[in-house]
Image (spheres, rainbow, N blue to C red):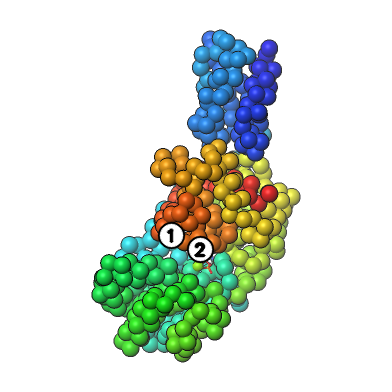
Amino acid sequence: MNLEQLWRAVLGELELQISKPNFITWLKSSRLTEKQEGIAVVSLPNNFAKEWVENKYHRQILTSLRNYDETTKKVEYRVHPTIFKTAPAQAVIAGEAQAALPDFKADPESGLNPRYSLNSFIVGSSNELAYAAALAIIKDVGKKYNPFFLYGGVGLGKTHLIQAIGNEIKSTYENKVKVRYVSSEKFTNDVIWAIRNKRMEDVKNKYRLIDVLIIDDIQFIGGKEKTEEEFFHTFNALYENNKQIIISSDRPPRSIPTLEERLRSRFEGGMIADINYPDYETRLAILKTKIQDRGMELSDGVCDLIARKIQRNIRELEGAINKIIFYQTTKNIVVDEKEAEKIISEIIQGAPKNANPSDIIKAVASFFEISQNDITGKSRKKEIVEPRQIAMFLLRDVLELSYPFIGEKLGNRDHTTAIHACEKITKEINKNQSLNQKILMIRERIYKN
Ligand code: ADP
Ligand code: MG
């Protein structure tokens, strides 16, 4: 048997042991490139694949090689891009640029993430009113437009803009103005914690000593009696002292059915602005800025295509860019208009409508070759914890499920565990290229089914 025949035989065996998608992803394009003095060299197209195959399939590969050739003592793995179809140098640079994106962390004191700046917020007809209000608030904190209620659909820049206001106030007033950003889930948790531990005073103090309170996604506190009550009092205390309150929601106050009337009327007494779907020019401008930030270049044709097709969600625009980087660097595919079209259709078809939680858990389990019971079970082994956290992240990101539901679905865990997992993965994804790739690959499988 020559090397090729030997490897084909080995792959034939492995194909029976490994799930089909994993086989196609990792092994189909592998080669056996050398065999000398009992050392077999398996070549893979990139470092990511090399590490994965080495960690996951080494034992099976060694056993199978020995079945066909008993002289095999050892297997070594190498990255050998040249024997695979190569992408232009530019794509490689893009990969490095992305890996080198600065690691943004939320500031523990204010809860603000410096990634969200006013400078990086692109203004167009869809958000100019909200943007103008933001500028006015920064100039006259607490005096004009108070409270400021910002609403709009998912992924249209609410979090970005309200955090940018906070960051800008912090830097303009050199930290003399105390800003605090919290998600409404965080606020709810604080209240629940305080009730449980009889520490309501702590929470009151924490929130009432602030000059600018920013609460994201207020629709989630609707219907939670104690939390609404506490929020109402915090709101009044701040408002009466001319402190600035900034609130975001996915819909206007009157459309949050569970919101108490007295809160609703407070919100309606201030400035209400919405963010709409961005028009083509705005989408193109956002796209070009983000591509540039990552040190990438894409042809005008590809940019135009993405901006035309992805209309309703800026997060999806970013998703398209990430995916293109991924294709160029990992799969060694040059993304032209035809490839871009494919990538986009995967993104906009989206899973949300037809995937259910079990599909996601199943996809994660099969990707990591662990059982679904491992994911929902008790194990705290690293090989299980990471997939579990990824599953939580995807349940949130793809299906927008609530944290309590996610916790319950994944082995009756507390909602704070789910929050922690989602926050951790969100943060890691930006600095850990390999994690980003794993998640994109799992997404791809969820979207395909
Ligand atoms: P929302 O809170 O409305 O769901 P986000 O603020 O999280 O949306 O925005 C989703 C993504 O799109 C973020 O990464 C954000 O930086 C980006 N984004 C949204 N609007 C803009 C904009 N006008 N300019 C630049 N980036 C934007
Ligand atoms: Mg948001």
Residue 152 at x, y percent in the picture: 56, 74
Q: Residue at x 68, y 49 (%)?
A: 448
- Name the N-terminal-most of marks 1 and 2: 2
Q: What crowding class fits label 2: few (fewer than 14 Cα within 10 Å), some (14-19), or many (20 or more)?
A: some
Q: Nearer the viewer, residue 419 or 152?
A: 419
Is residue 303 among what the camera can see? no
Residue 298 at x, y percent in the picture: 63, 53
Residue 342 at x, y percent in the picture: 71, 51
Does residue 412 appear to the left or right of 195 in the view shown? right
**Quarter of the image containing the N terminus?**
top right
- Return the mark for residue 415: 1
- Return the mark for residue 402: 2
Is residue 179 among what the camera can see? yes
Q: What residue type is labelled 2?
A: Ser
**Residue 143 vertical position relative to residue 276 in the rendered view, above or below:** below
Q: Which residue is drawn at 59% across and 19% down?
A: 64
**Residue 283 vertical position relative to residue 19 in the rendered view, above or below:** below
Q: Which of 48 and 423 is in front in this view?
A: 423
Cβ–Cβ under 8 Å for marks 1 and 2: yes
Q: What residue type is labelled 1?
A: His
Q: What element carries label 2?
A: loop
Q: Which residue is drawn at 54% across and 80% down?
A: 257
Q: Which of 359 and 62 is in front in this view?
A: 359
**Residue 173 vertical position relative to residue 12 in the rendered view, above or below:** below
Does residue 5 appear to the left or right of 226 in the view shown? right
- Return the mark for residue 449: none
Q: What crowding class fits label 1: few (fewer than 14 Cα within 10 Å), some (14-19), or many (20 or more)?
A: some
